[in-house]
Each structure stands twice: as C-alpha cells, then as structure tokens.
Image: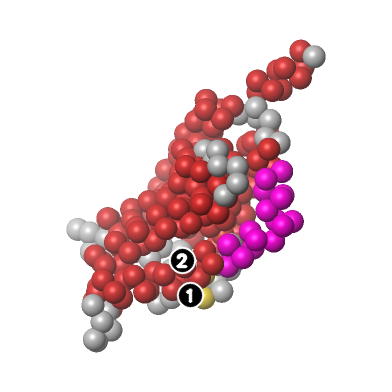
Amino acid sequence: MFSEEVLQNFFTSATGQITVAIVTVLILLVFIAILNKHQALTVQSLTYSAVAITMSVVLSQFKLMRLPQGGSVTPFSMLFIILIGYWFGTLPGVLAGISLGLIKLILGPYVVHPLQILLDYPLAFGALGLSGLFQKNEHNGLFFGLFSGTFARFIFAFLSGYIFFAMYTPEGWHPVTYAIVYNISYIGVETFLTALLLMIPGVRHAIYYVKNNITTPSQTKATIQK
C-alpha cells in the first residue's frame, strides 16, 4: 500500500501536489492566527514573515551541492526560517519551517515511506524554528538560534537516513556513522557558511535592526492615541 513507487507517484501527481498545497495553506493560516495572538499581527510582521518564507523557497532551488539520496547545500535558505523564529518566537518559526518543508515536498519530493516524509520535510524544516528558543538572548541569540535550529534539523535527517536509507551505506561503514557523515556533509556545510555570513557586521546589524523595530498592535495603538 505504501510502496516507494506508489508514494513517489502520488506526491509527483497533480492530486498529491494539490493535497500538499491545501495542507500548506491551512498551516499558513494557523501561522497567521498564532502570530496575531502571540506576536500581535501587523502588516509589518506579516510582510517580514512572507518575505522570509519566500526567500527560503527561492534559495532552496539553487543547489550548491546535491547529494544522491536527498539533501543539498543551498545559499542560506535555512537562515530565513531561523530568522522568523528569532524575530517572532518558536511557534511561528516552527510553523513557517513546516510550511517550507511542505512546499519543498511539492517542488521536489523524494519519498520512500510515510514516516520518512514526516522526518525529511515538515519535521526537519520545522525544527529550524527552534531558533526562537533564543529570541530573548540579545548577545548570542542569533548564533545560538542558528546552531540549535540546524542541529535539530540534523537529528531528523539523521533518523531518516539511518532508518530508511541504510541500504546505501558503503562497504566497511556502519549505518549510523554513514548517516551522521552524510547529513553533516550538507547541513553542516550550509550551517558553517551561514555562520560566516552572520559574522559580517552589516548583515548582523540588519537582522538586529529588524528585530528591534518590529511594531506590535499595542505599539501602533499607543502611537495613534498620541
């Protein structure tokens, strides 16, 4: 019932893509509702989030390095989901990451099992939003958020690799070792490149500027009353 061929054909079919698109839209609506309730929705915050998700989708289509069983190094596509968590909090970040994962499932699915779909797409990319755990850390929160989010993604990718792709382990390797090395080879490289980008003062200051100038409705209301 859930053979690799059946699943792959479903998710590459129009029906499968429409189904995933509907789920993605529903999650985005939940994302907006939660952002409105906890972060206080404004046109500004919606715009930042929409631009960040769009940038993640666009940049994820550029592969600096592509691996044979899935996974690739992209030009900083993970960063923009990490920023949503860092700017707005963990839950908005996780929901934005799940949305990105589902969009990637539409654009280029690599499917072998239902659990593998969850691990490699919504869970792995949703984990990037854990950067929000360090939202209130003013000094090192951005870097802690980067490393926590990408490490959490690595955990899900490792589990998927070990459980569903162990048959690709080269002779002489242990499946656990191969799954670790395989997933570090792209997640670790992109994390390293992203950390280098964030070390550029102008980039870091721009991110801090956005974070410090996000306007909430309560602030907007106070401004109008003045």
Which residue is outermost to the right? Answer: 226
Instruction: Give the amino acid type for the residue marked by disc 2 in the picture.
Output: Ile
Q: Nearer the viewer, residue 52 or 140?
A: 140
> Residue at point 33% right, 53% down?
118
Task: Considering the whole magenta stretch, tell me its main secondary structure.
Answer: helix
Lower position in the chain sequence, tag 2 or tag 1? 1
Q: Secondary structure at mark 2?
A: helix
Which quarter of the figure is the C terminus placed in? top right
Determine which residue is flagged by label 2.
187
Please provide percent x and percent y for residue 101. 45, 53
181 vs 147: above or below: below
Residue interval drawn in magenta: 193-209
Please provide percent x and percent y for residue 120. 37, 59
In the image, is 150 to the left or to the right of 181? Answer: right
Q: Which mark is residue 66?
A: 1
Quadrant of the rendered image containing residue 224: top right
Q: Nearer the viewer, residue 183 or 10?
A: 183
Please provide percent x and percent y for residue 98. 44, 48
As for residue 2 lying within the magenta part, the answer is: no
